[in-house]
Image: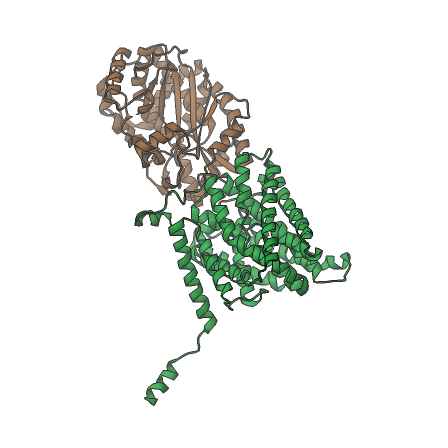
Chain colours: A green, B brown
Amino acid sequence: MNELMSFWGQWLRPSAGLPTVQWSLLLAVASTCGYLVYRHTGLPKVVGYSIVGMVAGLLGFSGAVWPLQGIGLFLIELGISIVLFDAGGRIPWRWFRHNPMVLVQSIAESALTYFAVYFTMLWLNVPREAAGPIALVAMAASPAVVTRVVADTRAAGPVTDRAIVLATLSTLYALTFGGAHAEMLSRPGSSFFEAVPPVMVMFGVSIVVGALLSGLIRLALRYMSPSSENTSIMVLALIAASTAVAAHLGGSAPLAALLGGMLIKQLHPRPWALPRQLGTASSVITMLMFVLVSTVAAQADWSAAIAGTVLALIAVRLVAKALGVGIGNVGSGASWRQAVWVGAAMMPMSSIALLIASQFMAASASTGEAISRIALPTILLMEVFGAVIATVALYRAGETHKPWAELPTGTAREEQRES
Amino acid sequence: MSLEAFHHSEPLTLGVELELQLVNTHDYDLAPYAEDMLRLMHKNTLPGSVVPEMTNSMIEISTDVCHSCSEVISQLTPIRDALVKSADKLNIAVVGGGTHPFQQWHERRIYDKPRFHELSALYGYLTKQFTIFGQHVHIGCPDADAALLMLHRMSRYIPHCIALSASSPYVQGQDTQFDSARLNSVFAFPLSGRAPCVLRWSEFESYFDKMTHTGVVKSMKDFYWDIRPKPEYGTIEIRVFDTPLTIERAAALAGYVQSLGAWFLEEQPFTPEEDDYLVYTYNRFQACRFGLDAVYVDPPTGTHMQLRDHILETMDRIAPYAEARGATGALQLLRKDVEAGQNDARWLRDRQREEQMLAEVSRQASLRFRGA
């Protein structure tokens, strides 16, 4: 017997540890839940992922901590970078030359959201130093959720395209102003001019890394087919490297990826659809990102007062985004009906909002605490219900393949619906 | 329902319809923007009309009645420019070509119009597979009997029209080995193919009455023939052309048809007969499959020859009529390509050979359409 145990002891090898097992099982459950939600309700899989993350967070799952740090932070940054690189690659600058009202629409909805949320927070007695950052967090719609909803419902059309572009642009503004604000917050007492250099460093690093990323991919695409598996792996690897480098040098990894995507669209006008080629690898990373976000966001402390503030924020944000999209709609080539659904499709908040909130938390623990008390529950609610609202909006706009009306009844139809 | 009376039209006048692809500028797949394009286009004052087509990634433009192919291009140009401007505003692109090279038919959505829904209910998946893009040319006829004569004479030149306009080599991402694969989709419809060989309008009316009595057809729109009479316009409508990649080629093809029609009316060169149709399907297949390199079987003699030689021979024959109608330039444009063995299908294949990416081929085709 002793000999057997001795052999057994020699045979065992050190493993990756309990956290790996926990995360693996959590992802397996999330994947199953996403599938079941999709199959039985027609809602996008991201709703299932978020629900599992939320339940795990509420049950006290300790695999992810707030504020974000270490590998959890990197994974969220990587997931966001992949989504934003693709989303940036969908924005041709020439479109704004031909249709400047889209840019007006974008600026109007972002600015209105910022000011509406800011003044609402002040009215609800949220401290001024927290109200501004919360308004910046609220400004960012989530291209990550919108693109997952689009993929799952197989949506296509003017509302879909415009919602993705406006969500991406709002993210660009939120990352830019959020990054600058966080840098200044991290240097309390310094004058405006003293705070400028670090802000410029943050932007400079992001721009340089973004330019390098697009330049390298552009170079590779001269010799490699965009439909090749090797190209996909190369792109993923370069995005991962740029995410690590940008964060390490004090830049913003998502901003770098977004700028990289936008730059490559200008440098490389040939068609190049990233999600079709990146396949399962990027799906795993983005799924992990959604679970992680809701797990972390669910760690917020709830109270009646916070719930009221959060609901007010969500309502004001919805109205502000819809109004902003509506104001810029005149002459933008879209109908009023479409403008309403574009506004609704921009409801989701997710990883980017969490990351911006995390930046504020890292910059100032006390202010960050006040921000996260309101931001985290808002992000949690909007990751789940935002995805549902976006799905309804695209469905009502007539751009999905009718998820509820045509629920699959047989194997063949299920296979066809699988993305 | 009885057949509408054949209305008067000025002989040899032209009307051109072009079905066009709407694609996104991201991956150049078809984009469901027909409604938005129609809304923007209706704000312009333009000749002709812009209307929806079967699925919502398609749009059809048409000219008013024109007297020459130069008038056709003078009408198509402002329509094309307005289309391009509207597309730029929506961040999409407009493309010619008989098929979209890699779209998946099951992803298409039927345009929300009662007739299209009725057709979808009747034909099932064929309606979504009907996301194909053709050019229709109407040519004015002096009277109803002359229209039938013109129709059946023109049938001998259907392979010419196919080979000259062929621009649909790719379907669902694959090279079909056909220059015009689009017409294979049309053939799936039960009332496609050729019109019955009757040369008197009274006989055609009785044929139509018998067909309506069976309940299979209700109007002339239910016939998907290669050429069909259009009594409400006083024309015959030639429907075998793939939409070319440029409006210049579309106008040139109209000029070719007009010159042929002028030759028919002036010289009455032959009398069509049922036996002409013995080789019709074979010639049609050859032109679809091999384009300008097809074999052409001369219906009256059974002689086999290269289609491109027969096209050049015909061009020589109709050259005086082309000159009289101001279509010499149009014929020269086509002749140059025939001599070089070039058509739009070959251009698309050349691009694909170079790029190895059909989405990029579509992007370059969109640049050609806008005249860049």
Toward the viewer: B161 or B323?
Answer: B161
Residue B135 position by quadrant: top left
Residue lying farthest bottom? A2
Which quarter of the figure is the N terminus of chain A placed in?
bottom left
Toward the viewer: B85 or A320?
Answer: A320
Query: Is B98 drawn above or below residue B276 in the view shown?
Result: below
Provide residue A227's location: percent of width, then percent of height: 43, 51
Q: Residue at x 42, y 15 (%)?
A: B13
Provide residue A177's location: percent of width, then percent of height: 66, 53
Q: Number of labelled discs? A: 0
Toward the viewer: B163 or A235?
Answer: A235
Provide residue B140's location: percent of width, then percent of height: 39, 14
Query: Is B173 drawn above or below residue B4 in the view shown?
Result: below
Residue A14 position by quadrant: bottom left
Residue B19 position by quadrant: top left
| Image position of A192 (left or right of B312) | right
Residue lying farthest front? A304
From this viewpoint, is residue A171 visible? no
Toward the viewer: B37 or A39?
Answer: A39
Provide residue A117's location: percent of width, then percent of height: 64, 49
| Image position of A17 (left or right of A133) | left
From this viewpoint, is residue A38 visible? yes
